[in-house]
Image (tube, grey):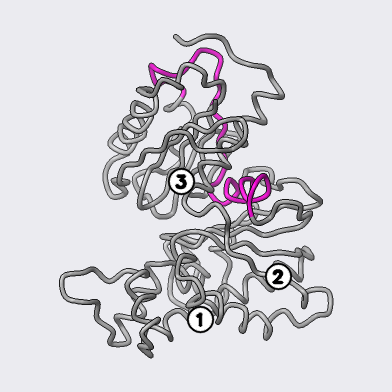
Amino acid sequence: MYAALDIGGTKIAGALVDEGGSVVRRTELPTPARESAARLARTVDAVIDELAAHPAWGTVCGLGIASAGPVDTAAGTVSPVNIPGWRAFPLVRSVRAHPMLFDGIEPVLLGDAVAMAAAEHWRGAAQGVDNALCMVVSTGVGGGFVLNGRLHPGPSGNAGHIGHITVDLDGPPCACGARGCVEGYASGTAIARHAVQAGWTPPAGTEATAAAVAAAARQGDERALAAYDRSARALAAAIAGSATLLEIEVAVIGGGVAQAGDVLFAPLRRHLGTFAVLGFARGLEVRPAALARDAGLVGAAAAARGRTRATGTPSAAR
């Protein structure tokens, strides 16, 4: 059994995942993103506590952590753009110190989108594909690459950080410090904000979310449709650029925004045709992620599985 954590700007999830990549136990808590580093760490500990209460915890032989980025896998630290309380936070050291963690287990850290790529390549929509880009489009936007049949996290673990490449030189400032980033157009937050600015309002008693905008788009609301079209265009530009640089064959899109289905994928495929115009990039296929909300957890487990196979099974529990 492998333990997995998936840390994002909205939720901190945890799971126990078996050798075949199936989730045996899942739990999550809201991310206290605007609170202190210590409060955030306590939330991570609480998720681990929930997993440790399961009978299968006694067979855990590895632990993987997928985190919103940037991350520094060599140093074991994280500085998520959407979690301002953590800047160069020593997440691996913090998790390693949990009293229920088994002796000998060294947590494996990777970016959440890299984890999603690992999961989709292991048992999802990129299975059997040698060159793929896998993207998480949610509160933030991230990506991970599979190149020549292998995960490509890069030296610091941030390869594929596609949410923070510029698609509009004069675009709005981004939380990362740049301007016109993909995330500022394509994230769930950006979609809802743009729709509201255009005059759309959510149903009475509900919040303005990307899911609510998607529901309005399905009913033909022009402002909601325009918000998703704007998101899809930014995504298409970034995906086409990646295909041009790296000759990827498939782009897999997951995360909460991808749950909009054809509201997102129809304009995305249409816009991709206007950006991916070179012959070797024109055949790029866009697929929805197969593992949905569990992709980060399954990918973190895959990383823990790889570490355990490379180093051997740790000793018994403390």
Indicate the position of residue 298 as horizontal and vertical percent values: 55, 41
Q: Is residue 73 left or right of residue 208?
A: right
| First to last magenta residue range | 96-124
* Three-letter code, disc 3: Ser
Q: Secondary structure at mark 3?
A: loop
Compute the Cα span from label 2 to label 3. Answer: 32 Å
Dot 3: few (<14), some (14–19), or many (≥20) neighbours within 10 Å?
A: many
Q: Is residue 37 above or below residue 170?
A: above
Residue 153 is a magenta residue = no
Q: Which residue is mark 3?
A: 79
Quarter in which the N terminus is drawn? top right
Tags 2 and 3 touching, CB below 8 Å: no
- Disc ID at residue 170: 1
Q: Give the mark, 2 or 3, whose residue is nearer the N terminus.
A: 3
Q: Which residue is mark 2?
A: 285
Q: Is residue 301 above or below residue 80?
A: above
- Res 268 → quadrant: bottom right
Compute the Cα span from label 3 to label 1. Answer: 26 Å
The residue at the point 76 percent across, 65 percent down is 249
* Three-letter code, disc 1: Asp
Q: Is residue 14 above or below residue 263?
A: above
- Viewer-nearest of discs 1 and 2: 2
Dot 1: few (<14), some (14–19), or many (≥20) neighbours within 10 Å?
A: few
Q: Give the mark, 3 or 1, whose residue is nearer the N terminus.
A: 3
Q: Secondary structure at mark 2?
A: strand
- Disc ID at residue 8: none
